[in-house]
Amino acid sequence: MVYFHLQTFLPPWLRLPTGQNLHHLIYGIILGFSLTLTATSIRARIDEAQQRKKERRTGNKLEFDERPIELRSDEVVKGVSGLIGNTPLVRVNSLSDALGIEILGKAEFLNPGGSVKDRVALRIIDDAERQGLLYPNTNSRIFEGTVGSTGISLATIAKARGYHATIVLPDDVAAEKVQALTALGAETERVRPASIIDQKQYVNLARQRALHFTQYHSKTTDDDESDHLLPSTSDDVVVATTISVSQTDSEPPSIDELVTQPRGFFADQFENRSNFEAHFAGTGPEIWKQTNGRVDAFVSGAGTGGTLAGIGRFLKSMDDKVAVVLADPQGSGLYNKVKHGVMFDTREKEGTRRRHQVDTVVEGIGINRITKNIELALPIIDDAFKVSDEEAVSMSRYLVEHDGLFLGSSSACNLVAVVKMAKKKQWVNGQIVVTVLCDSGTRHYSKFWNEEYLEKAGIDRSLKVVEELLAS
């Protein structure tokens, strides 16, 4: 009543509404106040997040929140194949701090087979099964020529899928790789290192073993192997079966016979497109997601070329400003191919080589021929750096001393190239460089991590080599 009585003493323009209009006014005030509080809260949260982001930067260097080790009990993967991929990026603290940039290594040594080659092996087998070239649990056999890591990965997945594996490799690779293959139940054949033009070269021999699978499997020499070859999606992929598929046969085999009979399959990582696809569809997108699309350069060595081509092409497709850089060990001709258009290395001159393939203590990268996967990489490579054995060995010791990272030879080679690239570009403002930590030092005890072996080879093992490189 007082409210309505006071209304009579106020001028019309100052009087408050009554009835339903009063209700609308009150609701409006409440709604406006609520929206103001909500907007203020959102703004405060945004400001807080931005402040945290700024606080994580000190001198343009990122600082990452430490978190406890978590047991991913909510995630159950199906078999060993489910453990492959989705590896973390690890900041290499010592080198990042010394250079003023962010060096992130893709920790591929955490794959179940111990290397980046797990991805390639899985994709090769998956693609072969999708194309009907391989069927699990049919007593079939996978053949491959490799210096070790791809063979270990193929043997691992082969066991899980019900296949046998025959791995042909040079007889001068690290002994522990052969031991791992034997432990995985693979049949190994060790041969003298030779040029790719030699039919006794390890890749060529693996292909021949697949071509002659019928004779290999039945222990006979009566049949013509061409009658047992199955058509495939590529000339490089060899698939042979124990039964004849000749067009001249009066009674061609039934579908059931073809599916259930053992097959010999040559994986051919050097030429097989599945190698590239494993990284273009897998590793590359993982890196892009993990860095939130912030990559200034990608650095990697090349053996088959699949890693460099797959990851490099994917990152370029997302941002063509990403620099793709080759790390090439001594004795490999890829550096000169990128720089000068000629596949040659001075250590390949007659009378100067210590061994018959790429002349380096680094295993897994470096090559002196152009593969189909390297052909995919060459057009996107922006720069290349040659890495000596002394630099790679010194880098591996430096990382153990300063970071506790026990890495293999190709990983060390990649990180030397990262340092050289950063020095050349004069990067010091927190640029993000991603590389691949291909495998751990456990694959290299008998050579790269063997002090006696290195001393006999005359290779300097001191940290001084890397210290001088960082100080230059």
Image (cartoon, grey):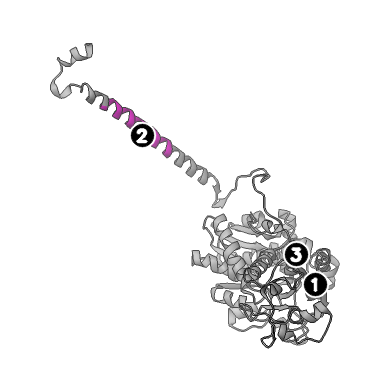
> Where residue 87 appears, x then y in whole percent?
65, 56
- In space, the residues marked 1 and 3 are separated at their CA atoms by 27 Å
Q: Pick whichever, 34 or 468, lies toward us.
A: 34
Q: Which residues are magenta?
A: 24-43
The circle on residue 35 is 2
**Residue 301 image label:** none
Q: How many numbered tags mark residues here?
A: 3
- Going from the N terminus, do you reach mark 1 or mark 2 first? 2
Which residue is identified by label 3? 162
Specify the amino acid type for callout 2: Leu
The answer to whether residue 37 is magenta is yes
The answer to which quarter of the image holds residue 224 is bottom right
Regarding mark 3 in the picture, which secondary structure is present there?
loop
Q: Which residue is mark 1?
A: 173
**SS class of the residue under badge 1?**
loop
Q: What residue is drawn where x is 22% and y is 11%?
A: 1
Q: Amino acid at mark 1?
A: Val
Question: Could you tell me which residue is drawn at 17 percent across and 22 percent down?
Answer: 14
